[in-house]
Image (spheres, grey):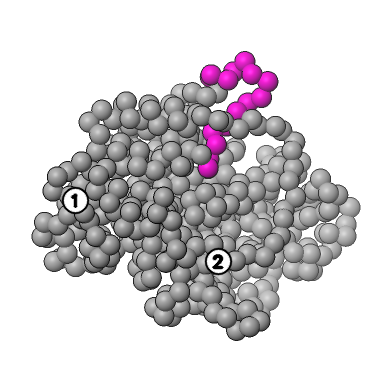
Amino acid sequence: MKRRKKIKKFVGNIHNKIYSRKFLENNRKSNKDFTRERKLTFPNLILFMLNSIKKSLQKELTEFSLLLRDERVKNITNSAFCQSRMKLNHSAFIELNKDIIEEFYTDNFFNLWKGFRLLAVDGSRIHLPFSLEIVEDFGFAKNNHLTITPMAQVSSCFDVLNNMIINSEIDRYGTSECNLALRHIDKCKFEKDLFIYDRGYCPIWFLFYHILKKKDFVIRMQRNSIEEVKSFFNSDKNSEIIEINELSQKSEKQTDNLNLEFKPFKIRLVKVILDSGEVEVLATSLLNEKKYPSREFKWLYGKRWGIETNYDHLKNHLMIEDFTGLSSLSILQDFFANIFMANMQQIFINESQEELKEQKKDTKYEYKINRNLSFGFMKDRFIKILFDKNVDRSIKNLKELFKINPSPIREGRKFPRVYHQTRKKFYMKKKRAT
């Protein structure tokens, strides 16, 4: 039986990667960068940017220099940091995340459904700080008063059974969510992945792309998407296999743009009744009705909610819209650094959760680690772990903090989605100093 890999394994790999010469050479802007000895060396710059920078930048730099306990590294200035970060490619944080994802799914215990990873894909829009460069590179939204708000389109591919972010993308505001999802599909190399989508991803060309790439899917269909779906909505059937023989003009244009040759393909329509009584139709590539009974699809689609709660975690706990610079490069660096830290937090949660389950085995409710509180505990401590000689002790201490104030799991509770007006939460010149 496979066992869950220990945190120490991940920490050791990250430390070795950050301090490796190859990692530096792969992720600096030019061959001349990081060749002279500076206070903010390449490893120190990476470590600082992983340390959840949420207070005023100068205060964070001062506290970080004290954290290093190195007499040679004192009084790092805001200017020094800004100059150093311009030499760093954001690909460093993508590479770090790619490594821990590969490690997580190699010879390790993780949850599957009938051999599949369940991968929910969804997009979101995020606010960016204002600068002409950011507006030009990412685009903007306008309100009724023609006020410009810089924004970006992001997309995430999230393993809902293991709470790991497999891949994230960020692009210009207004970029198609379906086109961003194609990048997730091409980057997911696991033997069996089942992609789960909401009804914004129901164009027929998009379904065909999955069939062509031999990637399975479950997609909530819009009632007026195609005639076959309309008929199925109004029928008494719970499951039906249909064949798609032609594309609409819009879908045909998309396949042409992707240089894809269309061929007829089969999908299965499954009817599910939500708790509200609303009837929904799911389209899936899982044609075998005996192996994948219709009754399981309500639960299966319901797992997609995990990506919604993960966006809430990223925006309100990790505060991914609280950026540290006014360049497009800083946006990319901060975004992917936060994605890496979200996954690293989950690796700590996994091990802490096992210990908590054993401690709480005789209680009325099962308990789970508080994600908001646990991320706060990672501030400074994760960086210390990466260069602490007594790494076992440091990991143990952090896990004990993770287990403080756990949340009881009460099955069956439901919370209606609340829609409200949003406003810009973070301001570059008004970051707190305490």
Depth check, front residue: 289 or 328: 328
The residue labelled by disc 2 is: 424
Comes first in the chain, label 1 or label 2: 1
Depth check, front residue: 359 or 182: 359
Q: Residue furthest top?
A: 362
* Amino acid type assigned to the residue bearing label 2 in the image: Lys
The residue labelled by disc 1 is: 74
Q: Position of residue 20 (x, y in %)?
A: 19, 48
Residue 430 image-quadrant placement: bottom left
Which residues are drawn in magenta? 358-372
Q: Residues within 10 Å of mark 2 (few under 14, many from 20)?
A: few
Q: Position of residue 332 (x, y in %)?
A: 39, 64
The kind of secondary structure element at disc 1 is loop
Question: Is residue 81 shown in magenta?
Answer: no
**Cβ atoms under marks 1 and 2 closer than 8 Å:** no
Q: Residue at x 14, y 45 (%)?
A: 71
| Left or right of residue 268: residue 372 | left
Q: Residue at x 84, y 63 (%)?
A: 231
Which of discs 1 and 2 lies nearer the camera? The answer is 1
Instruction: Evaluate whether residue 1 shows in this view.
Output: yes
Q: Residues within 10 Å of mark 1 (few under 14, many from 20)?
A: some
The kind of secondary structure element at disc 2 is loop
- 173 versus 202 height, above or below: below
* Amino acid type assigned to the residue bearing label 1 in the image: Lys
Depth check, front residue: 108 or 207: 108
Instruction: Evaluate whether residue 23 shows in this view.
Output: no
Q: Position of residue 416 (x, y in %)?
A: 75, 50
- 361 versus 168 height, above or below: above
Q: Residue at x 33, y 52 (%)?
A: 60
